[in-house]
Amino acid sequence: MDIFVGVDTLFVRANQVKVCPMLDRGEGSTTACCSIKQLKSLEMSLMLSKAVLMRCPSCADNFAHLHCINTCSPDQTTTINVTRTMNITTLGIVKEAVVGYQAYLSTSFADKSFESCKNVRIPATGGYAIATMCGRYGSALCTAQRWYDFQGDSSNGLAPLDIDFRLIPEGVTEGIPDGVVPYAGRALGCNEMTPTGAEVCSCQDCQASCPVVPSPPPPAEPFTIGGVDGYLVLCVIFLCVLILAFLLFVLSTYLLRKEEGKDSEKGKGKRKGMDKNGNNVSERLIEPWEVTCTDKNSLATQEFLGSGFRAWGTLVASHPLKVLLASAVVTAAFATGLMHIELTTDPVQLWSAPNSRARMEKDFHDKHFDPFFRTNQMILTAPGRPGHFYDSLLFGKQNFSGIIAKDLILELLKLQRKIQNIEFWSNDLNRMASLKDVCFAPLNPSNPSLTDCAVNSLPQYFQNSVANLNAKVNMTELGVTKEVDWRDHFIYCVNSPLSFKDITDLQLSCMADYGAPVFPFLAVGGYEKEGYTTAEALILTFSLNNYPRDNIKFKVALEWEQRFLDIVQEYQKSPGNPFTFAYMAERSLEDEINRTTAEDIPIFMISYAVIFVYIAVALGEYTSFSRILVDSKFLVGLGGILVVGCSVLASMGFYAWIGIPSSLIILQVVPFLVLAVGADNIFIFVLEYQRDARRPGEKREERIGRVLGNVAPSMLLCSLSESVCFFLGALSTMPAVKSFALYAALAVLMDFVLQMTAFVALLSLDARRQDGNRCELACCVTVKTTAPTKPNEGFLLPAMRKYYAPVLLHPVTRVIVIVVFIFMFISSIYLMFYVTVGLDQELAMPQGSYMLEYFKYLYAYFEVGVPTYFVTTKGFNFTSIAGMNATCSSVGCDPFSLTQKIQYATEYPDLSYMAIPANSWVDDFIDWLNPGSKCCRLYSIGPNKGKFCPASECEYQKHVSNLMYNVLCKSKVTCVSVLLATRFMAYHTALTTSKEFTAALKIARELAHNITLSMRSIPGTSQDFEVFPYTVTYVFYEQYLTIVSEGLFNISLCLLPTFVVCCLLLGMDLRSGALNLLTIIMITVDTVGVMTLWGIDYNAVALINLVTAVGISVEFVSHMTRSFAMSIQPTHVERAKEATATMGSAVFAGVAMTNLPGIVVLAFAKAQLIQIFFFRLNLVITLLGMAHGLIFLPVLLSYFGESVCVRACVRAWARVNQQISH
């Protein structure tokens, strides 16, 4: 035992206080049992451990505490028992040296010391410090005994001698040598300050230091009433109320009419009788004084429109060739804009508005950090291949799956090298190109070699070296000698991927050959928790730079990716391939969409051809076999199709002129929509002409004009409603919806204009041919059979007049119809609450696409989701102490710092969708400054600038600005005199559905907003400073945060003109406008309800179709409404019957039967998007429109339609004028 005195003694005491402060008892009272040389040796040994433990000062203190007690304590003989010594000769003097001893510790001290250290992290590796200090057991299986066993094992290269640590519970004396007392000093908790004043450990390293953070609220409970679905209860109540109200209305109407019948029998009624359906009627004439101002407005409107179109039709029919020429010239003028058309295929530009938050955040990130790299990936499995157990010297018995086998890893390495060595001639570069020309090389971006390219795979743990994979060496651990090989290195690296040297005697690095770590979830997949050796898949990923599309290297990257796909597809077909795998390239999504679009073009062509054939056949009159070629309307049908095509071309050309880009959706949907609208108008016009008889002395042109005057107001009503509807739909913020609405609006308007000009001219020419008994397609050939004098009503009109309308408008049928449709409407309202919002990315792929297999593998084997960055903007002072503390997670950092809040979020992955906390360059910098380490420091100023500078001599404030500019600005931030941006990378959980991607975005934004508010409270922070989350998928899924409200807004805007235009064109007929609007609303709501039942998700594509549904519904509904309003039949029922028979037959033939054949053909398309959103959804829209327009609306009008018809008002007003004239 030595007592320190004198100058030398003071020097020794100073060193002891520095190394073992827990032994200091004050000047003159401090005793020790070690020399200065021993203190220096102990200091060097402890320094290695402090380098990884200093993040938690109390842990480092406890670690030093034990070894100071064993080495320098004056009472060491009471806690240790020497078991082995040996003689050594120093300077000719033989001394006895201790080479092994037993150290007795109380379990209370040992356990508390271990608890203080077990959660300390190493930012450089991302793992736990304890994992490097527990040998084979790693962090997961480490205990206090195993921890001390490793410290006492001289074979680990760290312990100077063998120490057998004995952990003795309190009160146990058995097995303890006489005179030995287990050391039971006070170990510090990780949440306690050290005696020297060091702060408590951070929350990230010490759970006990964490503040009480309330768990995030669970997802909202479903809305219930009395334990039953609340929406269901409300809908049932609403249904009962509506049906009861309707039945009361029917009953009261019946009783009222019965009472009126009694009065009429007494002679009080003017007229009496029953209609053909058994409904009591009481027809009376409209007296002039009963004609209201609204009726006069309606009369004036109809007279004005009718006379105007009559004159116009006569003029056009009289000069058909001139009109056709003028129409062709105008159309050609518009269509020439197609030379400048720009087709948008970039999904970002299609679905994300330039001023949307996600788009602006993406642009900010890409500007400061470059775009997210392009991913080219393979996920490989070996199903059915047996695994094996491996008894590792360092890690114990481990279960290796069949895929984690040396021969398969070598095979993967062979494939990886083949892909890495891709070379091809590039016309853009005018030389041979290879991977290094386009690869993402994070550590050497300016002039990369092949080994600088970021390639992530399991062989990278061995630096892609076959020699490293084959390396073996004998190693001794805890007195046991065994061979260690690639498996030991693999086990170590997947747990410490950032290590530059493993703990085996192989001493291999875990870092990839391009200098960065390969995290285990990027190398293997399909494992439980951290059981990496049981993984079921290998992952191979090549990352390329994401160049702008106008950069010449963008084409080079596309070409490399195509060569990658060629090699992978060829390898998949090779007979010696031991893998079953899925693959993708960054270009794959766009390639597959374009491929299926091209393959499905014939389907669309067949669809249009079927529609054309139907129109050409259905428009014919066919009075006799001999006149088939005379009465056919092949050329008229072709002309109608050409009118539709010209209107679409004119619309596309016009917008191409003014620079509004088009898209594939416009090419697919707009022609279909305009064809539905145009065909309906064509049928109404042609059928009206065929059913009309020429009046005596009337010219053919005058007859065409008169017929046009009768039907054109109805055509104008529908076309104007739809056009205004789509123009208002262009207020959408989604680019794809906006451009579709603009193109559709102008196309519908142009279609109406061309129908009023070119089609009227075509019909005039065809009527001239038909009147001359000349054959179609062979105009020089005439037939002798003359046309019948009686107008041809065809088959459909008589059938609907004689059978359909009477059955539909029977009193019992009418009640049933209203009840059934009310039930459908309320049921659909209920189902609307459960429609799935989103678009799963696999639906964009055609059936049989290799991408579908890739998505299946991705969801099955990837353990984490996409990386997400928490990006900071300028305005925050990272150079201040407060600024550092607000962003770090080390000792002394704010427990609610940026990184710490992200860490808290990862503790609830099911709610936060965060899997891995953020890496922090701030923590790396703080550890870099740690005086306990002697690495990586240079003088920034002075005569020693550029030379090594120990952290103890470097001043933090002098270093920080230089570090941010010289180091950080090259990799993670962009600096222009001030710090403009920096980012912290975390990882989402594995996300598989649109719902999860959308929820992850929403939660990440909430978290970032919370962090922003906290950091703004730091003095000196700009109030426009912001933290926002960014990942590559956010720009696609942001739309689903607002698509419900935006959809309601857009559809409401579309519904508004259907009411306004209907009212205006019917002369302020509010009731007809309201019934018209109600029916269209019911069609739209019922469509969404059926979407829920048929598994059609609600997204931007569905929204486009719903906007289209409003337009098509106008065709089904508005013609019927106007026909009812113009009928002169005496009762509601008779007027509804006439409208159903006359206009209903035209609507059925023109809309329903035009759409259905073309829609059915789309069922054979390969693209799932077309099958779901064009076949299913358009089929639903057409069937529901037909049901509401031809079943529900006639019945609704028979109950609630306007009581005074327009033409009755005409008669009354005529009598007024007659009386005035007399």
Image (cartoon, rainbow, N blue to C red):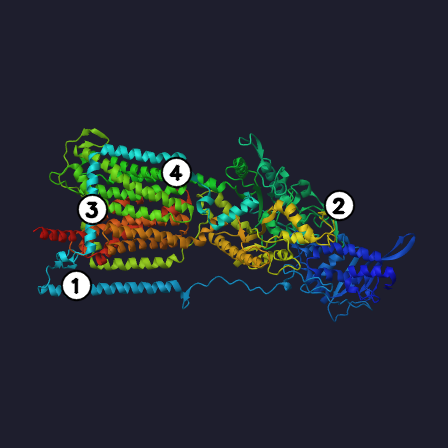
Q: Which mark is in front, 2 or 1?
A: 2
Please name whichever residue, 306 or 47, is drawn nearer the observer in this view of the structure. 306
- Give the Cα distance between marks 1 and 4: 61 Å
Q: Residue furthest right?
A: 92
Q: Earlier in the sequence, mark 1 or mark 4?
A: 1
Which residue in the structure is indicated by mark 2? 943
Q: Is residue 89 visible?
A: yes
Residue 858 lies left or right of residue 59; in this view the side is left
Q: Earlier in the sequence, mark 3 or mark 4?
A: 3
Please provide percent x and percent y for residue 958: 69, 51
Q: Earlier in the sequence, mark 3 or mark 2?
A: 3
Which residue in the structure is indicated by mark 4? 656
Please name whichever residue, 303 or 701, is drawn nearer the observer in this view of the structure. 303
Q: Could you say whether the residue bearing mark 2 is in a helix, strand or loop?
A: loop
**Three-letter code, disc 1:** Arg
Which residue in the structure is indicated by mark 1? 257
Q: Which mark is in front, 3 or 4?
A: 3
10 Å crowding of disc 3: few (<14), some (14-19), many (20+): some
Please provide percent x and percent y for residue 566: 53, 36
Q: Residue furthest top?
A: 780
* Figure check: 440 above or below 255: above
